[in-house]
Image: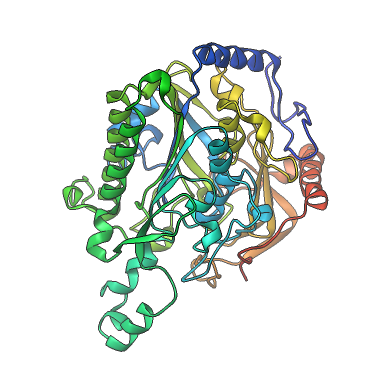
Amino acid sequence: MAHDPVVAETTVLSDSLEPRFVLEDQEVAAAAALDRYRASGRRPNVLVVLFDDVGWGDFGCYGGGVAVGAPTPNIDRLARRGLLLTSCYSEPSCTPSRASFMTGRLPMRHGLLRPPMYGQPGGLDGEVTLAELLSDAGYVTQAVGKWHIGENVESQPQNVGFDDYYGFLSVSDMYTEWRDPYFFPEIVYSEGRTRWVENLPFNKCFVHATRGGETEQVEEVTIPVLSLLDEKWTDYSLDFIRRMAEPAPAERSPWFLYHCTRGAHFDNYPHERFLGSSPAKHPYKDTIIELDDIVGRLVAELEATGQMDDTIIFISSDNGPEMETWPDAAYSPFRSAKGSTWEGGQRVPAIVVWPGMIEPDRASDGLLSQMDLFNTFLRLAGAEDTLPVDRFIDGVDQTSFLLGPDGISNRKYLYYWLTNVFSALRVGEWKFMVASTSDDDRDCMNLGGFTGVTQKYSHGRLYNLYLDPKEQHSYLIRKLAYVESFTSGIANHLGTFGRYPGKQMIAAMS
């Protein structure tokens, strides 16, 4: 009988772990593949490339590319070498997503419910990060680019498991929007207001730091500097890749490179080489061309240094499009955008490549949360026994999904949270929604910087995402037989917060 995620039963592996599917034949095949790979004593390098505000439909391999005015040949070529995911999910905005990837935990557990704004510290206080655990397992850990999980010293990359960090701690627009006369003429043309912003207590430079040390300011992020950042950051990552290949193969240490681009968060000021390079002749689309070039350069360096076959690559975006800055915004075929729990807010592009280990030229609609990479990368590194047991881990191990031939996702449910409000559950093609944001841009703006008001539904709404990907037609009255399945899934999930209470480091939206 074919596996049906709606009716199939999950396995509870631990009280502190999200239950998952355990498909015996798939598990055996994946374990055998890993054993063959490890027979020579190797462990895979991990390269994560996380774009900022790039949409599900921006790349050619997702139907965008040339069709939306920005061809992406390097990303498309890479997608054909591995697995293209059509139902990969982030959290609704950048900080929650980044912290969830780094901890394997939902925002309601790690506490970063929305992005910290000008000068707000954020914080990973008390959390255990993927970088820490990989470092403890002998990996060299490098973070490059946007951080935005906390400017407070304890939460900076060099203090949460990274050997080295080169990037900025906050978010792109906060460095430059007040410098641009097009957006802030009342500040740019007022000496008093300019000085007022300059004196606000937030970092205005990109920085460098090594493990346990203090950040050193590299350069103030003016608009001309901003246009060069992705180039500088890529050069830094390329140098890291080269250095890691210098020892003889038998003496090399495995590594984790977390490369987070500046692009394509508004406002986009692409490098001079890419200005006007897109058919669309628009800064956002020019930036997509630049990001595609970055992927091409990183992959080429892995090939040139003989490390490609020993590296698992994950490429994705931290959330859906920031449509409030249209047309400086991403493309998604789904409803709504960043800051919401509609599909357009959380469903993101994702490509996973590991030559010789992940079947090439494959696409899957199996559910994968970016949190799942926490468990999965630890398993691939041989460090699954270090998974924390004193807290609830929302990620699930997707090793057998990635490595098994025609692999099936190990995740049954995808949970959507609108900061501290439970919003929806997805299983199979069904999405049962009990709360959402309005997507009317006339509604008030909340603290996270996103338009919309939270609205709760008396009876819930049910969407078939295969028939109705824009979530326009609630199907619940014709599908009442499913209600018990959805409500029990929600109840079990919410029950985990009784055993493992959440926290709020950055408060919910008001």
Residue 364 position within the rendered picture, expressed as x and y whole percent measured from the top left: 52, 27
Identify the coloring. Answer: rainbow
Q: Quadrant of the N terminus?
A: top right
Q: Is residue 379 above or below residue 479?
A: above
Q: Residue furthest bottom?
A: 192
Q: Quadrant of the C terminus?
A: bottom right
For residue 55, side relative to residue 222 (left or right): right
Residue 337 in sight here: no
Q: Is residue 447 above or below residue 150?
A: below
Residue 27 position within the rendered picture, expressed as x and y whole percent measured from the top left: 65, 17
Depth check: give the residue in front, 391 or 286.
391
Q: Which residue lies at the image location 48% right of the left edge and 51% below the top edge? A: 158
Residue 447 in sight here: yes
For residue 483, side relative to residue 162 (left or right): right
The count of marks equals 0
Q: Which residue lies at the image location 58% right of the left edge and 20% below the top edge? A: 407
Residue 47 position within the rendered picture, expressed as x and y whole percent measured from the top left: 43, 35
Residue 141 position within the rendered picture, expressed as x and y whole percent measured from the top left: 46, 40
For residue 233, side relative to residue 373 (left or right): left
Depth check: give the residue in front, 180 or 194.
194
